[in-house]
Image (cartoon, helix red, strand yellow):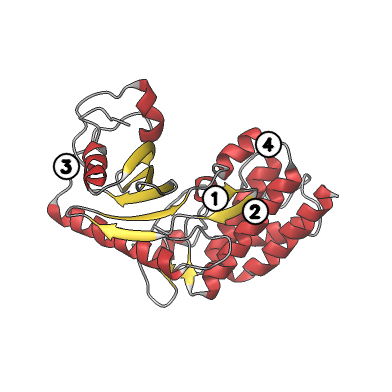
Amino acid sequence: MNLHPMHPAAWVLDQLRTDGWHISDLLAFTRASTLVRASRPGKQDVVLKAGFGSNHVLADLDPSQKPAAYGFYWYAQMTETERALTREDFRHEAELTAAAGGTDHVVPLLEQGSSERFDWYTMPHCDGGNFRAFMASSKDTGKGLSILADVADGLDNLHQRGIVHRDVYQENILIDQGRGLITDLGAARRLSTPRGPEHRGPEVHWPPEYLTGYNKASPAADVFSLAVLVYRYLCGDIPRLASHTNLPFVSEPLRSVVTAALSDDAGDRPAMEDLRTALRTAADLHQR
């Protein structure tokens, strides 16, 4: 594919082509990264994620290109210091993704490399899209709950490896052959090392402790965020103050587990394995 020459990702794709990649589609573009579907000669397509430094956007994009760029942006050029920090963050993401290799229900890293101005790594292409698209198109509640149970399993596996995701939401859940996988460890941290700012928020899917201790968030943060998504999926709304305990569309025991997982106090939330078990039980009941 050929991008408008002023598209900020154009030089990234040009560099990848120079390095021997065939680019078949631009999947997503943000200031932090460029996501493409690509292949080597004679090889199957993979998803390649490239760390990105930013260029100016000086022209509107063709409508066919807007879905991958969320419309179009006006970006100021990053300073060299900012670019270096962005590259360091991307390398950290790749390192954690590699460390999670072999973990069930986590999208694995296949290959990684570097160009002069950015780093990249590849992942398998998942044929089922992300969970946001699933919620918009599927009426199969049992299948949706099974996908979410898979994600809980993936997150629990990350936690056992000493990694907390910190950004669990619809777009970071991919579906492959009907199974759910967690992806994008860009916000993740090792539990042994504080990382990131102390204060973050608010976002709908983030727990309240991000306001005071984002850099030290524990696995309980992922429990909260996944519970928010379960609530949104089953109730068609976001949890709201004083009302999220009323879950008329959620059967027991999942109702009690989700209610506890939405506690403002991280210490009162259930373990991820408890949420996974409740999701699996609910999925089995819907699929009978």
- Along the viewing direction, whichever of 102 and 247 lies nearer the viewer: 102
- The mark nearer the N terminus, 2 or 3, is 3
In the shown orientation, is residue 216 left or right of residue 30? right
Front position among marks 2 and 3: 2
- Which label belongs to residue 148? 2
Between the residue at mark 2 and the residue at mark 1, the CA separation in whole angstroms equals: 9 Å
Front position among marks 1 and 3: 1
Evaluate if marks 1 and 3 touch, with contact meaning CB atoms under 8 Å apart. Answer: no
Front position among marks 4 and 3: 4
Evaluate if marks 2 and 3 touch, with contact meaning CB atoms under 8 Å apart. Answer: no
Q: At which x and y percent is residue 16? A: 26, 46
The crowding category of the residue bearing disc 3, from other C-alpha atoms within 10 Å (few below 14, some 14 to 19, many at least 20), is few
| Total tally of numbered discs in the picture | 4
Between the residue at mark 4 and the residue at mark 2, the CA separation in whole angstroms equals: 14 Å
Evaluate if marks 4 and 2 touch, with contact meaning CB atoms under 8 Å apart. Answer: no
Between the residue at mark 1 and the residue at mark 3, the CA separation in whole angstroms equals: 31 Å
Q: Residue farthest to the front? A: 42
Q: Amino acid at mark 4?
A: Ser
Q: Amino acid at mark 3?
A: Gln
Evaluate if marks 2 and 1 touch, with contact meaning CB atoms under 8 Å apart. Answer: yes
Location of mark 3 (residue) = 77
- The mark nearer the N terminus, 4 or 2, is 4
SS at circle 1: strand
Location of mark 4 (residue) = 138
Location of mark 1 (residue) = 173
The crowding category of the residue bearing disc 1, from other C-alpha atoms within 10 Å (few below 14, some 14 to 19, many at least 20), is many
The crowding category of the residue bearing disc 2, from other C-alpha atoms within 10 Å (few below 14, some 14 to 19, many at least 20), is many
